[in-house]
Image: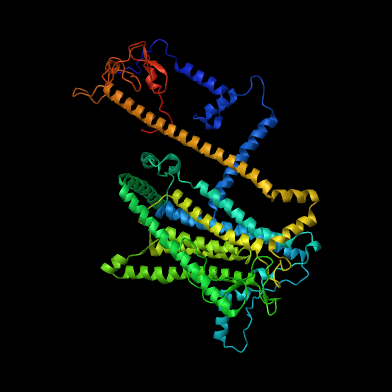
Amino acid sequence: MLLPRSVPSERAPGVPEPEELWEAEMERLRGSGAPVRGLPYAMMDKRLIWQLREPAGVQTLRWQRWQRRRQTVERRLREAAQRLVRGLGLWEGALYEIGGLFGTGIRSYFTFLRFLLLLNLLSLLFTASFVLLPLAWLRPPDPGPVLNLTLQCPGSSQSQPGVLRFHNQLWHVLTGRAFTNTYLFYGAYRVGPESSSVYSIRLAYLLSPLACLLLCFCGTLQRMVKGLPQKTLLGQGYQAPLSAKVFSSWDFCIRVQEAATIKKHEISNEFKVELEEGRRFQLMQRQTRAQRACHLLSYLRVNVLIGLLVVGAISAIFWATKYSQDNKEVPGVPVSAAPVPAPWGHRPGQLPGSSAVHIPGPAGELPSQHGGQPHSDLCWENSVGEELYKLSIFNFLLTVAFAFLVTLPRRLLVDRFSGRFWAWLEREEFLVPKNVLDIVAGQTVTWMGLFYCPLLPLLNSVFLFLTFYIKKYTLLKNSRASSRPFRASSSTFFFQLVLLLGLLLAAVPLGYVVSSIHSSWDCGLFTNYSAPWQVVPELVALGLPPIGQRALHYLGSHAFSFPLLIMLSLVLTVCISQTQANARAIHRLRKQLVWQVQEKWHLVEDLSRLLPEPGPSDSPGPKSPASQASRPRSFCPGFPCPGSPGHQAPRPGPSVVDAAGLRSPCPGQHGTPASARRFRFPRGAEL
């Protein structure tokens, strides 16, 4: 028995042919301004659309075709360059491995390390470009500092034994005394009067730290806004669709077993983060007011205790330094060499070899000794720079010692022995917040030393570069991942917030010293100025006409501050209004997405009701045309048709509204059975 090749389908009157639909679609695309590259059509159809959009009867000029080809080639070269930069980026392979094995939260810590390294290199570039290179080019009248590479430190004698001499040299390197006469510290920079040169080294030295701080602030703020958690905008009740991760997470271009293993761990970590966030959200919803009050009180208790410890440490440092200064009978405002107290509780304690630093009072209160004469042997900027140098050195040494003298032996003992104690001890957990606070404290010290130790960013860059490999080895070999997974966006936001606090902590004392504290008399660039900032009015008076001076005076007066505050208030109001409007739009889009998903479920329910269930007489073989024609060929999308079973009453009238908002007749009522088949689900929604 031969089956017919094709069965002519009955077409209801008024239904357009496919050719007519295609012509109508081509006419619509011809008149639209949508780019051809983004259309969901094959390449041949895109060429046809591109030809249809050409003006009728006008040939494209040769130079126009050449210009289009040139734009295409430039775009492809730009994309290839971007891929090359991403491939040759610093630590890209290591970051991919860490992110796949341990999740994006731990990877964000190493990305943060790379970001700090970039900030330090940019700061070093500023100092080298605007201070060191002009200083070497202009050749100041006074001889520059000689690099003490032989480490013949002051006070060392040639009659000392070799071991003791090496110990002294190493100690002077660690404390910074071996580099006192180099460009590492403030006291080695010397130039002539401002009127003797066109380029002002003093102004460049003064503005370079401020420009570095401003650049770091802008970069940190931009990265902070970029890493804002999406759930802050979408709301806490928003749940990410897991079905998209289930069906679209795998990369089918992977051919290497190692890459496949990393990808499996990456997908697993993403699911862990999603499920853990869902579990925490449910626990928060179930908490009572009493439980929330207990959690709030515990947080307040811990923060109050930390605040009391910080205040106590500052008080102890102040009284100890005051007692030391009273015994030495040297007037001035003392600043201790202890580590900078920070709210994150960095490693406290007095550093070995540290000493008190004598900083003179505000401008006009000059230090004096022995009858009111200036103290000529004191360069307090170098002393402060040495203390900050020691903080950076010993901070890095503590990182190395903790990695190889604590974490590594602990891992070896846990792997070697068995028992309850060793099972309880286990490997150390890699705590991302603790490690982040350590490097932020070191970066804060570097920012504080930009004026006293201009090349300190170079030293910190080397430390950050080595810290990356030390922490990577610790994570892969000696530690275990954190038991609580977290998202990279939230961790990045926290990192940048703490970094901004450190930046503020470094900028405030630096601004006070530059504007109010008298400089040393016998070292540095500002020996003849009451404060380093006094060089700015002098250069303005020397280099600007009276109109420019009056303009700068107005910009720095109170009369300009009031319009500036009003303008900033207006900008802030506009930003807040736009943010609220965006939040309302996101809420409406979420409701629309939920509605679309519900409509799809209605479609599935209507289809399951209208299609008859297969009976025992149905055969798995090919169906006859008569049996196929006996089934209903269409249904009303999203709504029950008149006469069909459903929970709602039949709608009167010749037509109903479908999910797309169009009116389409139902079967049996001037029907168009192809309307349901032409229905498409909206993009972005999922079943």
Q: Decide: is 212 above or below 49.
A: below
Q: Is residue 496 left or right of residue 478?
A: right
Observer-nearest of 531 and 558: 558
Which of the image's four quarters has the N terminus? Answer: top left
Q: Horizontal and vertical percent for residue 566? A: 62, 42
Q: Is residue 649 left or right of residue 167?
A: left
Q: Is residue 183 visible?
A: no
**Residue 604 is at least partly visible in this image:** yes
Residue 580 image point, x, y percent: 49, 37
Q: Residue at x 66, y 61 (%)?
A: 515
The quarter of the displayed image where residue 334 is located: bottom right
Above or below, comparing residue 655 to residue 182 in the picture: above
* Most foreground residue, 477 or 41: 477
Q: In what quadrant of the picture does the C terminus appear?
A: top left
Q: Residue at x 36, y 30 (%)?
A: 597
Which residue appears farthest toward the bottom when viewing the image?
159
As drawn, which residue projects farthest toward the left? 616
Does residue 571 lie above or below 3 as drawn? below
Could you say which quadrant of the image residue 353 lies in? bottom right
Q: Position of residue 211 (x, y in %)?
A: 64, 55
Extreme front residue here?
371
**Residue 628, position as x, y percentages in the image:** 29, 18
Q: Nearer the viewer, residue 436 or 117?
A: 436
Its colouring scheme is rainbow
Residue at x 55% of width, y 64% of height: 445
Q: Is residue 686 above or below residue 389?
A: above
Q: Is residue 642 toward the left or the right of residue 31 in the image? A: left
Quarter of the figure with residue 101: bottom left
Nearer-the-camera pick, 638 or 51: 638
